[in-house]
């Protein structure tokens, strides 16, 4: 399950609330964007090209491990030159689901759950406390949505729309895209205060 | 901070490393294996920047394999350590690797050995060595209790003493450690010492 917000900021200015931060590398692999938007978009597209070339040369799909290693090696060769990429490669291959964290320093980690970006500590808080390995798809998508919402609540550089994608054996599908402002009132509805209720009754008479 | 330490015993060498993958204040992963099996009878415990650590140790591993394929016999531990130091030295003035390495190995002729290789290409053959903030605690503990003819059980007791000291005194102490051993039967996992278990138990 992969989820992301959609806010882009330049210092204190919100430049966009509708950035696609989940990048579709190919029909069975997704990448997430954190750090520099241009770097992430370019290098993910480049990775997509390399994956396609691999499939054509070897007559079978590249594994998630292989794809993430390709990206990590590419980023490692540019280390120290100012690239800013914090990404997760999520996909499905012969060994089942795969999730890798790759960053601009050339680090690559295999894991079961990661959170990346300025709001990541907030998201980790919700994600870790609600996570179990054997959750259902509905529970997991709700946990993912909730993690993004809580990160956007506390972090100024996160906001916009919380998108949730599911990655399965047949590939990825987009499950939902909810505006986080609306999610806030959905999770924390505003009950009318006593004074307002009394006022309504008074004016009704 | 990353803690790596190791010692040589009677016909074996043991290395221990923490298993935390850290990014500023975030702990991304607490079961990251930082001790690479270089070949059948060599271990490389590495600490340093995440990209450099994996890329450099894999580079050394592939070159050690290449030597074996080309020449039909594996490198000795001393030769592998000197090769590693040479690569670090060559890169140092242009594009240095920020990796500190403890290389442990067993050769039939010379027995078990441990090599201390730091990021500026220092090379020492040692009986015990350590890197990182944890070294402040583990080095003195090892100096106090180490003997050159320790058995595996005694050495593991000493390693556990060091891990306990690091856990109790280091402010950003890593919760989990991995211990690997190399002796005449080869290089292999010995144990994991985990005080924080992740929800899924498999280590990757």
Image (tube, coloured by chain):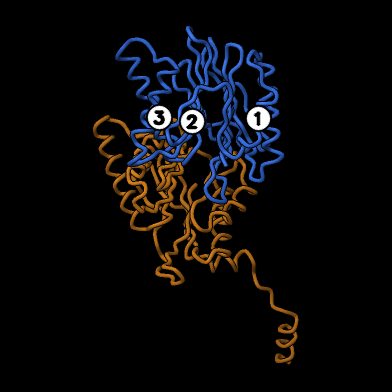
| Earlier-in-chain disc, 1 versus 2 | 2
In x, y percent, where is residue A41? Answer: 34, 54
Lateral position of residue A151 relative to residue A19, left or right:
right
Instruction: Say whether residue A40 is visible.
Output: no
In x, y percent, where is residue A200? Answer: 70, 87
Rendered image quadrant of residue A155:
bottom right
Q: Nearer the viewer, residue A94 or B128?
A: B128
Which chain is the one coloured orange? A
Real-space Cα separation, disc 1 to disc 2, in angstroms: 21 Å
Q: Nearer the viewer, residue B61 or B127?
A: B127
Name the residue carrying label 1.
Answer: B193
**Res. B101 mark:** 2
**Res. B58 mark:** 3
Tags 1 and 2 touching, CB below 8 Å: no
Real-space Cα separation, disc 2 to disc 3, in angstroms: 13 Å
| Earlier-in-chain disc, 3 versus 1 | 3
Instruction: Say whether residue B43 is visible.
Output: yes
In x, y percent, where is residue B103? Answer: 49, 24
- Classify mark 2: residues with Cα within 10 Å, few (<14), some (14-19) or many (20+): many
Q: What shade has chain B been given? A: blue
In x, y percent, where is residue B178? Answer: 59, 29
């Amino acid at each position: 399950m992969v989820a992301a917000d959609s806010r882009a900021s330049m210092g204190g200015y919100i430049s966009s609330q509708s950035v696609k931060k989940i990048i579709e590398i190919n029909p069975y692999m997704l990448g997430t964007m954190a750090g520099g938007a241009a770097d992430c978009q370019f290098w993910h597209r480049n990775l997509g090209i390399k994956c396609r070339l691999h499939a054509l040369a070897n007559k079978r799909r590249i594994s998630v491990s292989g794809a993430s290693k390709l990206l990590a090696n590419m980023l490692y060769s540019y280390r120290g030159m100012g690239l800013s990429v914090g990404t997760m490669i999520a996909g499905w291959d012969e060994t089942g689901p795969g999730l890798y964290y790759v960053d601009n320093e050339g680090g690559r980690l295999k894991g079961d759950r990661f959170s990346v970006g300025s709001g990541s500590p907030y998201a980790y808080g919700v994600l870790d406390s609600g996570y179990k390995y054997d959750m259902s798809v509905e529970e997991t998508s709700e946990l993912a949505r909730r993690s993004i919402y809580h990160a956007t609540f506390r972090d100024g550089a996160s906001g916009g729309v919380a998108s949730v994608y599911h990655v399965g054996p047949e590939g990825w599908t987009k499950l939902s895209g909810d505006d986080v402002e609306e999610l806030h009132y959905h999770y924390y509805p505003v009950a009318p205060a006593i004074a307002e209720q009394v006022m309504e009754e008074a004016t009704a008479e | 901070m990353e803690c790596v330490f190791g010692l040589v015993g009677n016909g074996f060498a043991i290395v221990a490393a923490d298993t935390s993958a850290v990014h500023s204040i975030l702990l991304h992963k607490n079961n990251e294996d930082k001790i690479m099996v270089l070949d059948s009878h060599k271990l490389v415990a590495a600490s340093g920047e995440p990209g450099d650590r994996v890329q450099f140790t894999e580079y050394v591993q592939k070159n050690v394999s290449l030597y074996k394929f080309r020449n039909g016999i594996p490198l000795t531990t001393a030769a592998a350590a000197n090769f590693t130091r040479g690569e670090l030295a060559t890169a140092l003035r242009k594009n240095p690797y920020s990796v500190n390495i403890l290389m442990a190995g067993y050769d039939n002729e010379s027995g078990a050995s441990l090599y201390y290789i730091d990021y500026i290409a220092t090379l020492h053959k040692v009986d015990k060595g350590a890197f990182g903030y944890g070294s402040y605690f583990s080095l003195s503990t090892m100096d106090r209790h180490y003997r050159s003819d320790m058995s595996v059980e005694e050495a593991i007791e000493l390693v556990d003493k060091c891990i306990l000291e690091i856990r109790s005194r280091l402010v950003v102490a890593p919760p989990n450690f991995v211990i690997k051993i190399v002796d005449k039967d080869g290089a292999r996992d010995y144990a994991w010492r985990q005080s924080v278990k992740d929800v899924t138990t498999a280590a990757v």
